[in-house]
Image (tube, rainbow, N blue to C red):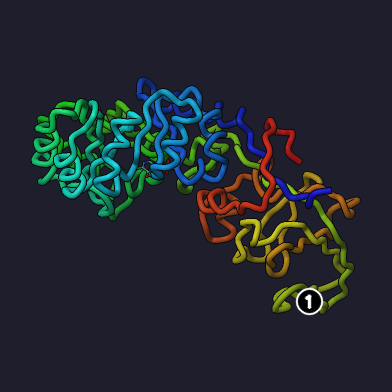
Amino acid sequence: MPRPLSATIHLDSMQYNLMRARACAPGAKIWAVVKANAYGHGLERGLRGFAEADGLALIETDNAVRLRELGWTRPILLLEGIFDGSDVELLAEHGFDSTVHCIEQVKMLEYTRLAGPIDVHLKMNTGMNRLGFRPEEYAAAHARLRAIPAIRNITLMTHFANADELDNPRLSVREQVRRFQLGAAGLAGERSLSNSGGVLQQAALIDALSNDWVRPGIMLYGGTPGQQTAAGYKLLPTMTLASEIIGLQQLQADDTVGYGSSFTASGPMLVGVVACGYADGYPRHAPHGTPLLVDGMRTSLVGRVSMDMMTVDLTHIANARVGSKVVLWGDGLPIDEVADAAGTIGYELMCALAPRVRVREGALGQAA
Ligand SMILES: *Cc1c(COP(=O)(O)O)cnc(C)c1O
């Protein structure tokens, strides 16, 4: 028997969440974001789960090539663009769309003779202050790209810092849109602004957001970027991490559990040992009280998460035994809830799924 820990990927939920993104941003074309191994779900599963997307967007050039090898013929967008002049040839050879966010990338495109026409996304820094040209530099960068004969379409792009909250006082979506419109004034071309947060807020921002392309990531994987709950947006979990109880301990008052003896029983208590630890990608810093499901019932973590195991309170779980099914996140327990308890975000939990975890596919409801 293999160790009872596995991650089940729900391709049906991925398809469903993509439909939800379409419903939120009607008329926009969708780049399904599959960077970081499709947020830990596996690149090839990303391709199949989002087969109906208008394009796939990612960071890694080698994985972009892999998508072509896997048979993806629609557009592929490199979200950070190219990293070196030698990458320019890849763009024409595989028909990749490239983000252009800095003058060095413009120069790479100017210096290299391209074999065929390519499309680019020109990125504006509207306040995120990570990648992109400032609004006042934007038109000049656009003109330089326009002068390169091999460049066909230039999509105007920016990225939101706080799309999960409508009116962040430090930098609101509206303010970023205002700067974008200023910098892009008079420039022709399609527009791409929204990540998941923007897509989910689309209804509230309909006046401000005119996206030809949207770039949802986390929402397609059943997570949300901020305070909103996935269920509130009718998003379904796409990854269920499940294991089993492999041992039981009956504690008495004042007994402690695990490394550092950081948890002390206040009275008689049944503790179960779950085959899942931080070497599987479960966050080591998850505190006592982090939720999980045992035989479908909600309970919580006690003691420190160790490399291969964690301990959970079974006192109130009737008939709990060695072999009881445990859901760490996913079906019945939104990943955002676990992430929140552990002081992180669902993105990080998905992406951190460790290579030793068996990954399989199954419909939602058939994981544990
Ligand atoms: C990762 C990424 C996205 C997707 O972000 P989510 O918050 O997961 O929706 C969109 N655009 C760019 C440029 C990205 O790097």
Question: Is 18 in front, or is 100?
Answer: 100
The residue sitting at 61% across, 56% down in the picture is: 281
Question: Is 350 in front, or is 92?
Answer: 92
Residue 193 can be seen, yes or no: no
Amino acid under disc 1:
Thr
Report x, y in % for residue 275.
76, 57
Q: Quadrant of residue 44?
A: top right
Report x, y in % for residue 34.
46, 38
Q: Quadrant of ligand 1?
A: top left
The residue sitting at 30% across, 29% down in the picture is: 211
- Residue at mark 1: 256
Q: Quadrant of residue 106?
A: top left
Q: Classify mark 1: helix, strand or loop.
A: strand
| Disc 1: residue Cβ within 8 A of ligand 1's nearest atom | no
Give the vertical position of 212 relative to 41 (above or below): above
Label 1: how many Cα within 10 Å (few below 14, some 14–19, many 20+): some
Give the vertical position of 216 relative to 286 (above or below): above
Report x, y in % for residue 14.
56, 31
